[in-house]
Image: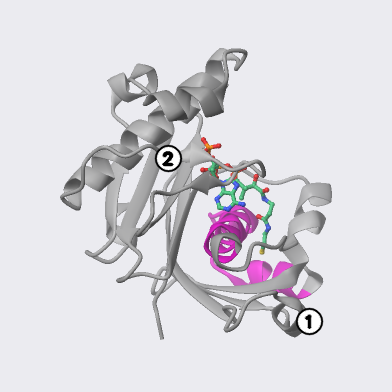
Amino acid sequence: MRDLLPPEVAVAVAAAGDWTGELLSAEAVCLGERAVETRRRDFTAGRVCARRAMAALGLPPLPVTSSPDRSPAWPAGLVGTITHTRGYCAAAVARAVEVRSVGIDAERHKQLDPGVRRLICSSQEEEHCARLPVGVSWPVVLFSAKETVYKVWHPIVGSWLDFHDAVVELDPSSGTFVARISPAKVAAAPVADPPTVITGRFVVEPEMVRTAAVLRHR
Ligand SMILES: CC(C)(COP(=O)(O)OP(=O)(O)OC[C@H]1O[C@@H](n2cnc3c(N)ncnc32)[C@H](O)[C@@H]1OP(=O)(O)O)[C@@H](O)C(=O)NCCC(=O)NCCS
C-alpha cells in the first residue's frame, strides 16, 4: 500500500500482534462489547494501524471513532482511511491541510460471479475489462477501485455513491485508474466543489488486489 500513495500520506500495514492490540477507550465504546471475534480483530488492527500512521506524522495517539453510518471519524485536522480483508489490514492518514481526502482498499484476488459483476460493472466496464491482458481478474480490481473511490468521496460529500455512479478505467501499463463520477451525482452533491474525477493507483498480486487514491486540494 505504501507504494500506491504519496509521501505526505502515512501508511501502516498490520503486523501479527496488531489484530489483538489495544483500543483507546472511545474506540472500544464504538466497537461495543458484543462484537464478534473477527469484527473485533479487524476493528482493532485498523485502529492500531491508524495510530501508527499518526505517529509517523509526528502526532500523539488519538482515537478514531466510528460515525453512526460506520464511517471512521478522524481526529480534527486529519483525513484517513482503513481497509481490512482476511489476514490483511492497512490504514493511511494525512494532514487535512495537505490532502483533501484519501481512500484505500484491499480485496482477495479471485473471479467474481457474473451476478456480482453486473452489480459492480456497467456493460462498458465489462467490455473494458475484457480488452485488458489475461491472467488478472480485472473486475475485482475495478471493484476495489470503486470501494476506494467511495472512501474518498464519502468523507467530503457525505452522500451514497452506487457502483454505477462512477465509471472506472484501468491502465495496467501504469498501474493507475481514473474514476469519473456521474454528472447527476456531482450535480446533486450537497457540497461546493465535489470531486468529479478521482485518480488512483493499483497493484495486483496472486492473492490480493490493492487500490489507493488521493484527492488533493485545488
Ligand atoms: C464502506 C465500504 C466501501 C467498505 O469497503 P469493504 O471492502 O466492505 O471493507 P474494507 O475493510 O475495505 O473497509 C472497511 C472500512 O471502511 C471504512 N468505512 C466505512 N464506511 C465508510 C465510508 N462511508 N466512507 C469512508 N470509509 C468508510 C471503515 O473504516 C471500515 O473499517 P472499520 O469499520 O473497521 O472502521 C463498503 O462496505 C461499501 O459500503 N461499499 C458500497 C459503496 C461503494 O463502494 N460504492 C462504489 C462507488 S463507485
> From this viewpoint, is residue 13 visible?
no
Give the left or right position of residue 12, taking residue 154 as reference.
left
Q: Give the residues in magenta.
A: 124-153
Query: Which mark sits nearer the N-terminus, 1 or 2?
Result: 2
Please state which amino acid type lies under the numbered disc 2: Val
Q: Is residue 129 above or below residue 46?
A: below
Which residue does the image show at 60% across and 17% down from the upper left? 35
Q: Where does label 1 land, which residue?
A: 184
Residue contact at pointers 1 and 2, CB within 8 angstroms: no
**Residue 126 magenta-highlighted:** yes
Asked if disc 2 is less than 8 Å from ligand 1, the answer is: yes
Q: Where is residue 171 drawn, in percent x and y?
A: 49, 74
Q: Where does label 2 land, which residue?
A: 64
Q: Using the rendered view, name the quadrant where residue 24 is placed.
A: top left
Prevailing secondary structure of the magenta residues: helix
Residue nearest the observer in this picture, 38 or 71: 71
Residue nearest the observer in this picture, 60 or 123: 60
Give the left or right position of residue 40, taking residue 214 as reference.
right
Q: Using the rendered view, name the quadrant where residue 181 is placed.
A: bottom right
Task: Residue 92: give its label.
Answer: none
Label 2 element class: loop
